Image: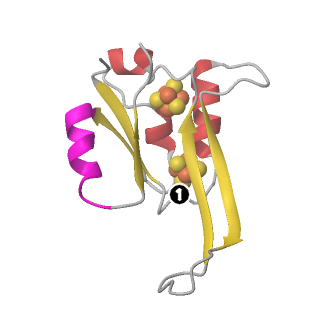
């Protein structure tokens, strides 16, 4: 079982892609390989006549790939993951599964992610 996870609060993700770039530079991934990608879903109109909020769905969300190792090398040096450190919206966090799950329970529009081991 994984011990650590990323928590991404996509309500505040701006789609700036700093996490993508920081991860790529940290791991020196070649062209075409990524440790994290920012996906863009929308805008598309919600099909709900009773919708009280925004009438459009438009979420940008950073999703780690199979190449994410949670920045193991940085963690050995007591540094937080490169994506977390460089997220311009400060909407990414790193911690134990338990810590991140506790944060996840506090608000909606967040996702928790753990790597394969
Ligand atoms: S934790 Fe490290 S390897 Fe994983 S997405 Fe973030 S920067 Fe990339
Ligand atoms: S750096 Fe942060 S705000 Fe920018 S795309 Fe990545 S998760 Fe979103």
With 30 as the anchor, is 68 left or right in this view? Answer: left
- Residue drawn at (55%, 81%) of the image: 54
Q: Using a 10 Å C-alpha cutoff, classify the residue at mark 1 as few (fewer than 14 neighbours), some (14 to 19) or many (20 or more).
A: many
- Which residue position holds label 1? 13
Whether the magenta-drawn stretch holds residue 99 is answered as: yes
Up/down of 101 relative to 29, above or below: below
Residue drawn at (25%, 50%), measured in percent from left and top?
103
Q: Which residues are magenta?
A: 96-107
- The part of the image, by quadrant, that contains residue 24 is top right
Magenta stretch secondary structure, dominant = helix
Decide which of 46, 13 is in the foreground and name it: 46
**In magenta stretch: residue 100:** yes
Q: Position of residue 32 (x, y in %)?
A: 78, 25
Would residue 108 appear left or right of 68 to someone viewing this image? Answer: left
On the image, the x and y values in percent for residue 97 come to: 26, 32
User: Which quadrant: the N terminus?
Assistant: top left
Q: In what quadrant of the picture does the C terminus appear? A: top left
Disc 1 CB within 8 Å of nearest ligand 2 atom: yes
Front residue of 104/71: it is: 104
**39 left or right, relative to 64:** right
Give the image location of residue 72, x and y in percent: 41, 17
Q: From this view, report whether residue 33 is shown above or below residue 103.
A: above
Residue 7: which quarter of the image? Answer: top left
């Amino acid at each position: 079982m994984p011990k650590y996870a990323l928590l991404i609060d996509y309500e505040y993700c701006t789609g700036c892609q700093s996490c993508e770039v920081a991860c790529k530079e940290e791991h020196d991934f070649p062209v075409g390989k990524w440790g994290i990608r920012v996906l863009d879903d929308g805008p598309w109109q919600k099909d709900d006549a009773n919708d009280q909020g925004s009438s459009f769905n438009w979420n940008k969300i950073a999703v780690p790939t199979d190449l994410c190792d949670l920045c193991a090398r940085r963690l050995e040096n007591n540094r937080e993951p490169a994506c977390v450190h460089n997220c311009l919206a400060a909407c990414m966090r790193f911690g134990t599964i338990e810590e991140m799950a506790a944060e996840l329970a506090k608000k909606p529009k967040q996702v928790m992610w753990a790597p394969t081991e």
